[in-house]
Amino acid sequence: MPEIDFAFLADAADAQPGQKFNVLGGGVTRIGGQAFPLTHPHLALVISMTVTSPEVGASHELGFLLLGPDGAEISRAEAQIRADGVPGGADAQVTFALDLWNLTFTSPGEYSFRVLVAGSERKRLALTLERAAGRPGSGLA
């Protein structure tokens, strides 16, 4: 089963297969808003995983969940990822970005992104939504 090497949220990201990836505003862990529900225009979920040599060329089922502070599911996505390479060769590294457009957060609190591989949770990212006082330079995304 592929292993998640790293995952993080960013303002934007571009990841092309077999190339370096570019990130703008990586490491998003907090978002502030003056009013809720809050619709955030865009986030990118950046993920890098290792696919072992025997798994190269096979499709791998990935799932993505966003859960609210009460544990209720807010959003879900699924994808099939395949790492190309030489069978019997080296492990393959796959890095990609999932664009998340216009996510609506109903209230302040602790939200959670879950990354699943073959139905099993492999990574969890926390995202705190805060009510901002509207002051410039508050450091909130």
Image: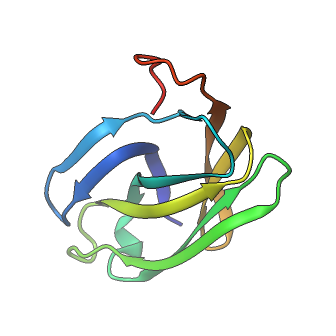
Q: Residue furthest left?
A: 19
Q: Examine the image and state in which quarter residue 81 appears.
A: bottom left
Which of 52/22 is in front? 22
Which of 89/45 is in front? 45
Quarter the C terminus occupies: top left
How is colour applied across the structure in the image?
A: rainbow
Residue appearing at x 23%, y 67% in the figure: 89
Which of 92/21 is in front? 21
Residue 138 x/y as whole percent: 47, 18
Q: Examine the image and state in which quarter residue 126 appears.
A: top right
In the rendered view, tell whether residue 70 sits above or below residue 136.
Answer: below
Compared across the picture, whether 88 is left or right of 117 comes to left
Q: Count the marks: how many?
A: 0
Residue appearing at x 61%, y 39% in the figure: 127
Q: Examine the image and state in which quarter residue 33 appears.
A: top right
Residue appearing at x 83%, y 54% in the figure: 71
Q: Residue furthest right?
A: 70
Which of 37/22 is in front? 37
Residue appearing at x 54%, y 77% in the figure: 78
In the rendered view, tell whether residue 29 sits above or below residue 50.
Answer: above
Residue 123 x/y as whole percent: 60, 50
Residue 25 x/y as whole percent: 32, 36
Compared across the picture, whether 38 is left or right of 139 comes to right
